[in-house]
Image (tube, grey):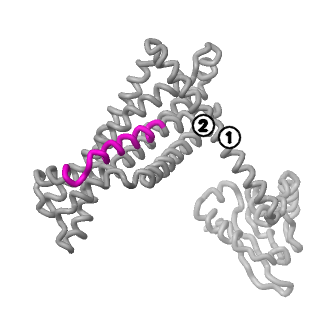
Amino acid sequence: MQDTQPRIAFAPAPEGMRAKLLGLWTAENLAESTHWDALQAALGALPPEWRGWQWDLREVQRMDHTGAQLLWNAWYRQWPDVLHATPFQRAMLERVAQFSSVLPPRRRQTAWDMFLRLGAVVVRVEEHVVGAVRLLGQLLLDAVQLVRAPRLGPWRDISGHLYRIGATALPITALVGFLIGVVLAYLMSQQLRQFGADAFIVNILGISLIRELGPVLAAILIAGRSGSAITAQIGVMRVTEELDAMKVMGIPQGFRLVLPRAIAMALAMPLLAVWTTLAALLGGMLAADLVMGLPPAYFVTALGKAVRVSNLWLSMGKSVVFGLMIALIGCHYGLRIKPNTQSLGEGTTASVVTSITMVILVDAMFAVVFKDVGV
């Protein structure tokens, strides 16, 4: 059976190295992954002095334009100094060279290029900041309008978003919170047992879950779940030209799209934070009972003495800020989406990443500002 695998045989020659091409250099044969990977590895390992070699194409069984294009790209779209080829092969390579653009040489990056790139980043950040400030200002104006005329408010939209953001998120937040509580209690018990401080697991779990992990964990879950949904919903409205139709009909986008989502998120986030914290405390309590022998009655009694109520109010206040921030970021990126599917995917991804990052940053700010509250 004749060997048709496309390959390059390298051998020393009196004038230097000799590169002999063998096999079938056709699109059908190159489509096989084993042939393609082996050939890419051989062509990618060419040294800088490849142009001085003798390239012999005369023993190639058959070559089409796909094989010629692959070889021409491997030559960096330059002719070698010595080329042995049939008239048909040379004519095919000349056609490929004629209709292939010349790759520009890579220019070293200068300080001016870095300055221009920094300027582009600053301009993009400035656009996002201006858009966020404009969105926040419009939200305040819409809130004033809602207070002046509450009967004309989008209450049905708010209730619908409350259900989708809050009620449907209860199972996943409870499950994740419960597992986090079990893991934390188990790991802490291993360390506290070494010092005979088993009872202090209530203090550590109570402060960490009620003050920090509960609201932050709920906010991260909601940012990935509902924040992305907000961006995707508004982005689809952009793709389907519903936003343009609202503008033509005179329907305010901020009052009908941003305000209901912001109010629903601000109301749902504190409740979800408390729900997640309770699930995490339940998991920690069960793990402490199984691993350390602390009964649930002692856990509940000691929790009220170890954790002040101000920690709960602080976590709920943080959750309101988290909810407003996630809703505004989701709406901001949703309104910036262009009418194409690629922009929709990029905007949704950017919305989730930005929301999670801002949640962590704002939580760090709260930790620094309120470090003396409830401790």
The secondary structure making up most of the magenta span is: helix
Stretch in magenta: 304-324
Say which element carries label 2. Answer: helix
Q: What number of labels is visible?
A: 2
Q: Is residue 319 in the magenta section?
A: yes
Instruction: State whether residue 61 is above or below residue 254.
Output: below
Q: Could you tell whether 38 is left or right of 365 in the image?
A: right
Q: Which mark is residue 286?
A: none
Residue in the picture at 26% in, 64% down = 187
Crowding near the residue tagged with mark 2, few <14, some 14–19, many ≥20 C-alpha atoms within 10 Å: some
Going from N to C along the chain, the mark reached first, 2 or 1, is 1
Q: Which mark is residue 127?
A: 1
Report if the CB atoms under discs 2 and 1 are less than 8 Å apart. no
Q: Could you tell whether 296 is left or right of 322 in the image?
A: left
Q: Is residue 45 in the magenta section?
A: no
Q: Could you tell whether 242 is left or right of 42 in the image?
A: left
Which quadrant, please, contains the N terminus?
Answer: bottom right
Type of the residue with mark 1? Glu
Type of the residue with mark 2? Ala
Q: Give the farthest residue toward the front.
A: 372
Nearest the eye: 176 or 143: 143
Say which element carries label 1. Answer: helix
Q: Position of residue 189 (x, y in %)?
A: 22, 65
Residue in the picture at 46% in, 29% down = 261
What residue is shown with label 2? Answer: 132
Q: Position of residue 181 (x, y in %)?
A: 26, 54
Residue in the picture at 52% in, 35% down = 328
Q: Quadrant of residue 291?
A: bottom left
Which quadrant, please, contains the C terminus?
Answer: bottom left
Q: Position of residue 137 (x, y in %)?
A: 58, 30
Q: Position of residue 353 (x, y in %)?
A: 52, 48
